[in-house]
Image (spheres, rainbow, N blue to C red):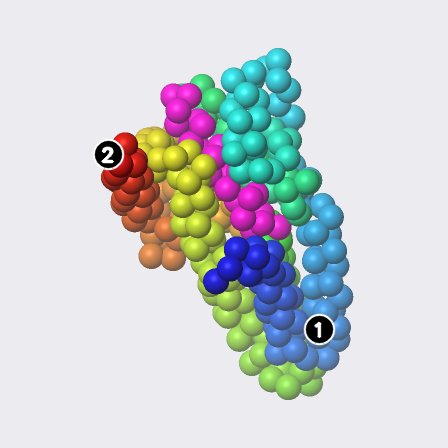
Amino acid sequence: MTASTMQLTTRLRPWALVAALTGLLIAFGALLGGSWLWLFVFFAVAMNAVGYFRSDTIALRAARARPLDEAAAPQLHAIARDLAARARIPVPRLYVMPGEQCNAFATGRDPEHAAVAVTEGLLTRLEPDHVRAVVAHEFAHIRNHDILVSSIAAMVAGAISAATAFLQLSFLFGGSDDDDGPLGALGAIAVMILAPIGALLLQLAVSRQREYLADATAAEMLGDGRPLADALQEIAGDRADPLDVTAATAPMYILNPLRGDQVAKLFSTHPPVRDRVRRLRAYGDHARRREARAVAA
């Protein structure tokens, strides 16, 4: 595959996933039938429009993030400028969010409108090299053009959860009409059961591979996978309280911010830390061997 083909694939992949998200919402409406179909069609179109233009604002507000100026964190801004040059992207806006837990996420519709938010704990509790590695991971998401689809996925997952809750209330209080759709009450029950599962599977499909890809891209930017591997291990072993975020936005973070037993490990939207660390260390070993051969030559 040529470089231009890879670049085209990278840019088209988010739009293919956005189309799948839209189809998922409309499919639920079709299952319910009647006026529900048109409501879900309108909802899906509106969600895409809002997600494209306002996903970064919504995500940052949900995380209670505030702008981080250079005077407050000169070292982080210096890291951002260096990594942006390495990634060949504009320097994103930097934000800080409350929480002792070490974590971070990237959002925005494209590299020109991107933002990276880090927790207060990340700035105060991690070593500079580990902070740099975490930020490199988030910059990798921006470089790989997958921040848009992750942001929209979070919005759609939240919307599906809200619609399911509304449908449950409507069904319990007699709002369901057997003649509304092709399956009537059975369709409503099916949506209430399948919608959360579909949203979870969607998050799994969107999140896991993008995390592996961002890890690999960050290791390439840093020239070594070990700093990010060490940072992931340190964050995973952190016992700080979970962040005050929703399950829908959790996949946007470098590691699951909910932790504990709130999300079953089997269905976690994040890959196992041990697998990510193994891949990153393998990259570091390969890079060192390549360096040794270059020096010997």
Q: Is residue 287 left or right of residue 75?
A: left
Q: CA distance from mark 1 to mark 2?
A: 68 Å
Q: Name the mark on residue 78.
A: none
The front one of 142 and 116 is: 142
Q: Residues within 10 Å of mark 1 (few under 14, many from 20)?
A: some
- The answer to whether residue 89 is visible is yes
Q: Residue at x 52, y 44 (%)?
A: 141
Magenta-colored stretch includes residue 128? yes
Mark 2 lies on a secondary structure that is helix
Region rendered in magenta:
126-148
- The answer to whether residue 65 is visible is no
Quadrant of the snapshot with the C terminus? top left
User: Magenta residues: mostly which secondary structure?
Assistant: helix
Q: In terms of image quadrants, where is residue 72? A: top right
Q: Name the mark on residue 296.
A: 2
Q: Is residue 228 left or right of residue 82?
A: left
Magenta-colored stretch includes residue 50? no
Q: Amino acid at mark 2?
A: Ala
Q: Which of marks 2 and 1 precedes in the sequence?
A: 1
Q: Amino acid at mark 1?
A: Trp
Residue 275 place in picture, x, y as percent? 30, 48
Residue 244 place in picture, x, y as percent? 51, 37
Q: Residue at x 58, y 79 (%)?
A: 187
Q: Is residue 278 left or right of residue 80?
A: left
Residue pointed to by mark 1: 36
Q: In terms of image quadrants, where is residue 88? A: top right
The front one of 91 and 135 is: 91
Q: Residue at x 56, y 32 (%)?
A: 85
* Vertical placement of residue 32 versus 290, above or below: below
Residue 123 place in picture, x, y as percent? 47, 22
Q: Residue at x 42, y 21 (%)?
A: 128
